[in-house]
Amino acid sequence: MINQSEYKFKVSASGRVNIIGEHIDYCGGKVMPAALSLKNTVYVRPNGTNFINLSWTTLPDTVSLDISRLDSYKHLRYGNYQAGSAYLWQKAGHKIVGCDMVQDCAVPFGSGLSSSAAIEVSTIAALATVAGESFDKVQVALTAQAAEREYAGVNCGIMDQYASACGKKGMAMLLDCKTLQCDYLPLDLGGYAMVITDCKKPHNLVESKYNERRQQTEQALAILKEKLDITCLADVSPEDFQKYSHLLPEVIKNRTEHVVYECERVKRAAEALRKGDILTLGALLNESHASLKNLYETTGFEPDVLAETAQSHPACIGSRLTGGGFGGCTISLVKKECVQEFEDYILKQYRQKTGYTAVCYRADIDDGITVDRL
């Protein structure tokens, strides 16, 4: 139990759920995430030394990071995300002061709900706060993304860190990952609730095929740039794809087809949400999952069982894998009065089919970074 009176600040950042728009953030597309009430919270106080002393509520480990050697902790089993965040913030010209930092993470690890982004964003915000610096949430997000890419080795887009930092309570975010223009849309699902279910098959995006998918989309972009005036793969229209897809090797063609039509699904999903057309939104979730399964190949047996079992329930109008894939969580839109029945059904069926015990998370759509003086 943390004695909050011993610390000076409490700084939190959110995990996120991506409603639709998967694997297109690093292709310059628009995505639709929302920040969750599942957060990483940092309790921090200055200590007058040249060290950042890390501890966790969920681990017995403690780690001390020398502020003058922040680039040398990539090997750490625990603390590498915090070290990378501190190093990239320092590298960007910000002051780092010695501090004691307790990390309390309520975002399930390996779930596809961006625990890493929540850790990075909250750590940077805490470091800025304890150093007496004001901070811009977008700059925090961009620095956190750099930490994930340059320090942790995951060649990610900006969506996770942006949602973690800049989320707003009750709002979905229509984020243009090329320009960082963000429109906030009320996430009013009418008579439906969003159910998040974790397949409990842990994933690791560094060891998975995530970076390979990134390379494949870059290969597609290079080929199509010879014919089209585009700056990113998300600039390719369905008409352009139909005209030039024959130039792409079969696997690269499949990856590109997912990106092109997932971008279209995000547009349609935003329109549906604005109109309160939740049935259309649900149908788009189903289409997105099928594309991730058949074209982008980032789902896997367990997530497919979870999504397809959900889709078979009469109270569910749509279900898809959310996040980087290769494990993690699904989101399902379910009639509010049937949520408990749905959860009981899906957990039982999933256990019978896979041998894993899935978990349903109850979470609200919440603000991103919050700072409280203790």
Image (tube, rainbow, N blue to C red):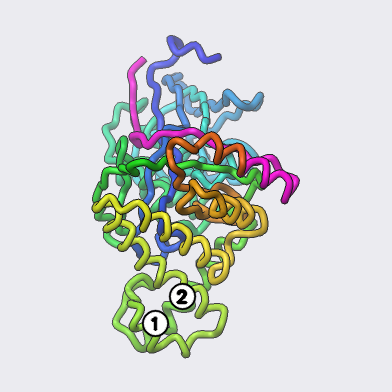
Image height of 54 relative to 306, above or below? above
Dividing the image into 4 quarters, which one contains the N terminus?
A: top right
How would you rate the neighbour count of disc 1 (Cα within 10 Å): few for under 14, some for 14-19, many for 20 or more? Answer: some
The residue segment tinted magenta is 346-374
Q: Residue furthest front?
A: 314
Q: State left or right for residue 198 relative to residue 270.
A: right
Question: Where is residue 37, by image quadrant?
Answer: top left
Question: Where is residue 176, by image quadrant?
Answer: bottom left
Question: Where is residue 165, by image quadrant?
Answer: top left
* Image location of residue 14, percent across then percent down: 42, 36
The residue indicated by pointer 1 is: 241
Gap in angstroms between the C-alphas marked 2 and 1? 8 Å
User: Contact (CB < 8 A) between labels 2 and 1?
Assistant: yes
Asked whether residue 87 is in view, the answer is: no
Badge 2 amino acid: Thr
Q: Residue at x 35, y 64 (%)?
A: 29
The residue indicated by pointer 2 is: 256
Dividing the image into 4 quarters, which one contains the C terminus?
A: top left
Residue 204 lies in the magenta stretch: no
